[in-house]
Image: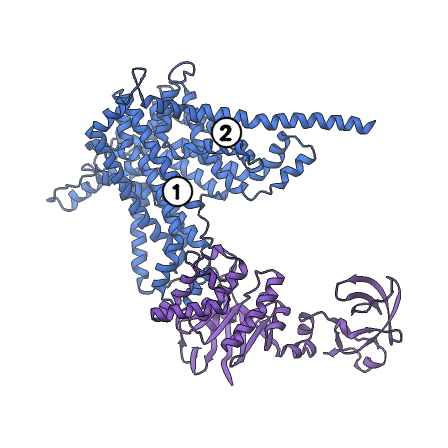
Chain colours: A blue, B purple
Amino acid sequence: MNINRFSTKVKNENQQGVNLTNSLPIVLLVIVSIFILYPIIILVISSFSRYGHFSLENYKITFASSTTFKAFINTLKMALITLTGTWIAGGFLAFVRHKTDFKYKKTLDNFVFLSFTIPAYILSISWIEVLTRGGYLNRILKVVFPTITYRFNAYTIFASAIILILHLYPLVYYGVGNALKLLNGDIEQAARVCGIARFQILIRVILPLVMPSFISTGLLVISRSMANFGVPAQVSLPTGNEVLTTRIFSSMSDLNLGVVAVLSVILILIAVAIFLISEKFTQKKYYNVNADNKNINVSVIKLGKWKQAINIAVIIFFVFSVIIPFITIIISSFFKRWGLPFSKESFTISNYVRLFSQENLLTQPLFNSLIYGIVGATIASLIASLIVYLYVYRNNKASKWLMNIAQLPIAVPNMILAVAAMFAWINEPFKLYGTSSIIVITYIVLFIPICIKQMLGSSENLDKELDKAAITMNINIYIRYTKLFLPQIKDSLLSGFLICFLISLKEIPISLLLYTSTTKTLGVMMFTVQSNSYGLEMTSTISVIVIFFSFIGHIVLKNLGSKGY
Amino acid sequence: MNYLNIENLEVSYENNKLKSETKKVLEDFSLDVNKNELLVLLGPSGCGKSTLLSAISGLITPDKGSIIYCDKTFFDNKSGINLPAEKRNVGFVFQSYALWPHMTIYENIELPLKAKKYKRNEIEEKIEYILSVVSMSEHIYKYPSEISGGERQRVALARSLAYEPSLLLLDEPLANLDANLKAELTQEIREIQKKLEITTIYVTHDQHEAFEVADRIVVMKEGKIMQKGTPREIYHNSKNVFVANFVGKNNILVNEKNLFCNSIKKCENRIIAIRPEDIKLENDGENVGIIKKILYKGNHIEYILCFSGQKIIAHSNKEYHYNVGDNIRFNIKKYNLF
């Protein structure tokens, strides 16, 4: 009698569990389809539509324009220079760090970390403050060499590329550095014992083995530099040197939405292609070079007579990439007005006061950024964790589809996510344009793949039998997810949340395209404050605050042992 | 004739935690290796076996001492000679095989030959020959990831032998393989070494492997030689408690208060080592113990006895009808005293 009653209870719970288990992927699929697929589909449809009808006119207009063609060429030029620069800088520093007896390895790590925390846009502000005609360099030169005329043009595509190199080289440093670190010491030593010369070992053994890391990080650099808006907008656009992202922005300002849609679709296609190639490279596992071995990294190259030269090269690099940008931004933030002479009267702390008390410039945007960041990152973490849970423990067709759709935005430039959101949420029935929801939703779309990436790393090592064991004990999916799955991935969940939150504090293009007077963010303020009644001094003041938050956030992340470092 | 002569070698490592401290891995270490001999370095993890191989090959630089191969000085701190690894012409097989994963098997063997400036036709010939020796000719254009662990081991061996090294060093070459494959490859390595007549030093912590392959065994502990000799000498005439305990199973007992009858009476208060197979269970045995456990081991039965308060293990391949708790009589056929 008792047994029967127990069986009935089990059956009911099982049925409930099965229903919930089956309905969860469907609910998630609907959510990601609405948030991610729908805007992109609308964007693609818009690119083929003119006056409500199917047309290729938008494409014809876009491709016929010489400005667009020039923007293409400039984008390509910028991406390739950035790629070359990051490969040289990141690869060289990674090699010095991991394969030589360079003495200041910890200091090198710390400086690369600092480079990583400075947003690219802020680097471009510093570039302007130092190298333009009214900049610090020219002012110093005027004092030292009064007769020399300063002719350096700081507003070029090359300038954008240099700034992007200083911002993106840590990607190569970390990627190639990890590959070098994991390189089985035996492999190199086997070559030495076989009588192969050092240089040959470098060319024939080490370089081919770290090449996949060079290529995958290189593709990431190309993708990130092509998608960047803030830097070319600041240092290339003023002299009419457009790239694709600034072209989209200016076409948007001219209400040329057809061109906006076409350029966005093209950027998506390029970005997705790069993403897919990059994924292929990272999946290629035949270079399985890390194995247990006792001799790992026993041999390092002795720098010998090159020691001083390497030390000086590293110091010069960090002076230009970290120290000068930091100092200029901080000094400028204390100027009463950018461009005033260097005298005691020119400096003030009132810029900081104005931001939060007198004119209250930053209180609302800071509050907005915090709220949008927290809400966006929380919802994205939740959705991402559910998707990862299903992917790891179910791994069926539905969960794979879910994973693929959810990861799609990682290949799409931030600006295009904003453009797609604008196209999708401007009309009924989902009229969200002009509200804070559209920014939050776009943040969620941007953050989901970032959170997934963080969690997938730690989930790969989870024992797949754990969930099955719980199912056999009739534990329902809610308990399995909250009590068994979440505690195991909590660190990566938290680091994913923090990474997203940090992005929300410094991102510009999404909020810039979607903000209204009440939904301004820190990024919008940083970009627009200069064009109002303030100069670069106020941009610098906001930059100092953003750097401060970014620095603290990255320190917390680093302590969490996040995978990205 | 001594082919390799190591004298007063000292190697120390920096302590990872306390950078100011150094740990001596080898101290005042001397060893001779004969021509065409296969010498096994046997010992627990961390005893300095692999460090010795690294020092011989030139991958690490010793602090003191000398390593001389025939008339060629590899290292001598007194005269300041330290021949680089690439100039010692030594073959080294690593535990991880250390095959270059981005090269085919052919390319893996070809690269060292090219480095040694062999001509193209010589390279072809040598690769063909050495792959036939290790029975890997059919896999010549495969990548290391496309072959099994045992095959990778064969390729690693072929790569180290192709350029005709004067000395072959094998660092736990079979440690990553399963038992059956290990037994098969142990024999193969032995045959290849004899066929090519190459002086070889073989590092392992597996005594069965050591016994199967060695001409001579050197048992090491904490950077020092505990005993060297033929496998038979090491097993049957262990010179100290460590070797007796480390090599094979042994009952190590203190013979206090005339523990055993007659035969060992005179050796009171000395440490005695008795191999389990040297304890014969006999109805007229001099000693009596109580059976605590009986374990069936396939080719023999293991009896765990309690004898005067001490645990003794005895092996027998005869089937007795004893039960746990029974008294059992036994004689000691052979023992070692320390």
Q: Secondary structure at mark 1?
A: helix
- The kind of residue on which mark 2 rests is Thr
Q: Chain of mark 2?
A: A
Q: CA distance from mark 2 to mark 1?
A: 28 Å
**Which corner quadrant holds the C terminus of chain A?**
top left
Q: How many marks?
A: 2
Can residue A361 be seen here? The reply is: no
Q: Chain of mark 1?
A: A
**Which of the labelled discs sits on residue A197, or is there none?**
none
Residue B47 is situated, as x and y percent measured from the top left of the image, at 58, 68
Does B188 sit above or below residue A437? below
**Residue count near mark 1 (Cα–Cα under 10 Å), binned few <14, some 14–19, many ≥20:** some
**Residue count near mark 2 (Cα–Cα under 10 Å), binned few <14, some 14–19, many ≥20:** many
Q: Which residue is mark 2?
A: A378
Q: Secondary structure at mark 2?
A: helix
Q: Which residue is mark 1?
A: A278
Q: Does residue A321 appear left or right of residue A209 in this picture?
A: left
